[in-house]
Structure formats: structure tokens, C-alpha cells
Amino acid sequence: MDLESLRLRAAAIADLYDRHNLAAGRGPWSTGDLALGFVGDVGDLAKLVMAVDGRREIADARERLGHELADCLWSVLVLADRYGVDLAAEFARMTAGIEKHLGDHRPDKVE
């Protein structure tokens, strides 16, 4: 699946969550709510990584790792969608900047 397909799928799932919350008498999640949910998912991911690396005890940590990574990706995709951020363009710009910075500071580079 390409990034645009992932973005569309994430937005569709977010819409389902919004409809579910409205039907349950709650409001849809704001971008702030989404960001807080993301922070919680990142915390869960960190605990699973620690368990996979042998630093914590969590049952089925390795099996749960992929799901938690996907939860985090979903949050990033939905936040980018809600804010109109082109993640592909931003990722390309960010990685190009890192490559330039690291290329300019190579240990073997003679100035």
C-alpha cells in the first residue's frame, strides 16, 4: 500500500470512530485528542520495545509490536490529514536535510 492509500484508509477509520463516538453520545475526537491518543500509543510502543529487548516482562510482546507500530502510524496519518500536511513531501524534505547535514559532516570529508 502506498502512502496515499494508507492516508485514505486511516481517514476512513477516523471517520468511523467519529460516527461511533457521536452515536454513543460523545463528540468526535479533536486533533488534540488524537495527539494525546498518539502519545499513549507511543508509550505502549516503548514498553513493548523494552519487553522485546528483554528489559520488561510483557506477554506476547513480539506479537503485539506490529499492532502498536500500526496504531502509531494511524495517528500520524490522521493528524497529517486533519492538518493538510503532505507527509510524502515532508518526509522527502526532512530526509534530504538529514543527508545533507550528515554528508557535510562526514568524518572522511576534507574541508
Image: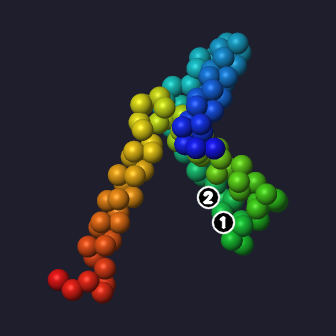
Q: Residues within 10 Å of mark 2 (few under 14, many from 20)?
A: some
Q: Is residue 2 left or right of residue 57?
A: left
Q: Position of residue 75 (x, y in %)?
A: 57, 39
Q: Are marks 2 and 1 in contact (CB under 8 Å)?
A: yes
57 above or below 34?
Answer: below
Camera-side residue: 51 or 88?
88
Q: If the image is split into quadrants, where does the N terminus sit?
A: top right
Q: Which residue is mark 1?
A: 50
Local crowd at mark 1 within 10 Å, few (<14), some, or many (≥20)? some
**Residue at figure coordinates x 31%, y 84% from the top left:** 107
Give the CA distance from mark 2 to mark 1. 6 Å
Q: Residue 12 sits in which quadrant?
A: top right
Percent of width and height locating residue 61:
76, 60
Q: Quadrant of residue 48?
A: bottom right
User: Left or right: where does residue 14 sit relative to residue 79?
Assistant: right
Q: Tag 2: residue type?
A: Ala
Q: Position of residue 7 (x, y in %)?
A: 56, 36
Asked if residue 84 is positioned above or below residue 98 in the image, the reply reads: above
To which residue does mark 2 refer? 46
